Every structure is written in structure tokens, then in C-alpha cells.
Amino acid sequence: MYSKEELLRGLNTRVIGSKLFVFESIDSTNICAKTLAEAGIEDGAVVFAENQTEGRGRNGRSWLSEPGNNLLFSVVLRPELPKEKTVFLTFYSAVAVAHAVESLIGTSVECKWPNDLLLNSKKFCGILLESSFQQSSPVYSVVGIGINVNQRTFDMEMGNRVTSLSLEHERDFDRKHVFQRVLEHLDRLYGEVRAGDFKNIMKTWNAKCTMFGKPVTVSSAHDRFSGKALGLSSDGGLMIETSGGTSIVYAGDVSISQ
Ligand code: BTN
């Protein structure tokens, strides 16, 4: 297990990672980060764990991860943004992870709406954004990031939809190195986030998104329909062309049909 000192040694950031909490096992780093945020922990604080007993994914799902082999962490963010811009924190985090991973592996990472990162069309990273609002302004947001780094086997039911850095590159990765690179890229882009300027982040995300122009199926708790992914709306939704016109989706799972 990494110690806090080890994870901080050589880290070159100003805000992100200004405080670090490290656990061998915890229910969920997002739950812990939210508790710390409620108690007033500062902007950029990070909760890191080697194992989660209640790791959370989107839409009420679990996030499963082999203890000690991957990266599981959550970052408390307190940028002063209007409520409608909070959604862009997911794209910000995705771009930071993509840059970090690309700098280590030398090949391109793909972004999939709303919060997945893929290598060779398989998911290796998920991001869970949870925000608390007061009078339509976010008081804090927690960005939870799970990166499959050195795990080599996955549940059969996940089929060949998931992967890890080590599976794709046939070598193990230094998890501390990956963690620090991600924090450094989050830190580097944080000035733009604080200024509410997501232009550059969204341009990068869009350039890395491989779904546009492809047939997709969207499933949510209440609905399931197919169409062609056209692009993102100005408020971060996914525009889909269907036989009945253009729909904008804000939640749900999207599978790419080809
Ligand atoms: C998803 O793809 O469904 C989002 C997965 C997010 C998983 C990470 S792991 C660290 C943090 N703590 C959690 O409980 N979830 C996020």
C-alpha cells in the first residue's frame, strides 16, 4: 500500500492534492470526499484508496476494482461556477486523465459520453461527479475517478467491454506515476475551470470523442431508443438524430452500434 508521503513525493501541483487522505480500504472515496467537503475541506483535497467496499458507479451501479492494482480516488472541487456549468467538471476530469494516460502510453485515449475513457474501444476509466448545491450555486463538487491500471482479469459479464492499461500494453504500470500525472493535468487545467472557461477543454474532449456520426442506442431507466450521435449540445447533453427529429440526452447509457 502506498503511504501519503510516497504519493506526494515529487508531486508538482498548486491546488489539486493540496491535502491528501490515503486509505487501505474504505466504503467509497466519493462518500469520504463528500463528508470532508461538508466539513469544509479545502479546494483540491484528494481521497485515495487501495480498495473500496462500496465503490460507486453511475446510475446506481457498483464500481468493482481489484484491491491494490488500480487507482481509486476522489477530488473535492470548489470553483465558483453557475449550476449549469457544473456538468463540465466531468469533461474537465476526462480530458485531464486522457492527457495523463496519453503522456505515459503514447497512444490516443478515446472519450465516450458522458464520462468514460476508452482504449481500443474498451473502457479503462470511469468518472463519477457528485455536486452539492445551495440556491443553484454548487457549494462543492466531488469528482471520483476509477482507472484500471494493472488489473488483468475482469468479470465475465463485463465481457470485452472493459480493459486496463496493463492489458492494452502488456506491461505493469507504476500506479503512483499515473496518479501524479493525473493530478498534475487536473491542476494545469484548473485555472480555466475556475475562470468558467471550458472552451479549450471541450474542444479537446470533442476531438477525442469517437461516437459522433455513429449509430447509438441510449438506455435509461424509462426509455430505450436508437439514432445517430450528432455531437454535444452547448449544455453538455448528447444530441441524437432519430426518425422523429433531434433529441438531447442528459442521462443514461449509450452503446455504440458499430
Ligand atoms: C462509472 O463509470 O460508472 C463511474 C465510476 C466511478 C468510479 C470511481 S472509483 C473512485 C470513486 N469512488 C467511487 O465510489 N466511485 C468513483
Image: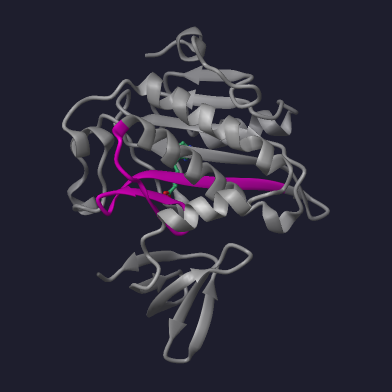
On the image, which quarter does residue 187 sit in? top right
The quarter of the image that holds ligand 1 is top left
Colour mode of the rendering: one colour
Left or right, residue 210 beside residue 187: left
Where 44 sits versus 164, above or below? above
Q: Residue at x 39, y 21 (%)?
A: 177
Residue 18 locus on image (x, y percent)? 64, 20
Q: Examine the structure image and report whether residue 115 is included in the region drawn in magenta.
A: yes
Left or right, residue 145 beside residue 124: right
Q: Residue at x 66, y 28 (%)?
A: 36
Q: Examine the structure image and report whether residue 79 is included in the region drawn in magenta.
A: no
Report the quarter where the C terminus lies: bottom left
Q: Is residue 75 visible?
A: no
On the image, which quarter does residue 51 sit in? top left
* Secondary structure mainly formed by the magenta segment: strand
Q: Residue furthest bottom?
A: 244
Residue 74 locus on image (x, y percent)? 53, 33
Q: Residue at x 37, y 14 (%)?
A: 1
Q: Which of 221/95 is in front?
A: 95
Left or right, residue 233 beside residue 149: right
Q: Which segment is the magenta one?
A: 105-132
Residue 245 locus on image (x, y percent)? 50, 89
Where 74 sits versus 62, above or below? above
Q: How many marks?
A: 0
Left or right, residue 255 beside residue 190: left
Q: Is residue 175 visible?
A: yes
Where 17 sits versus 166, above or below? above
Q: Which of 80/253 is in front?
A: 80
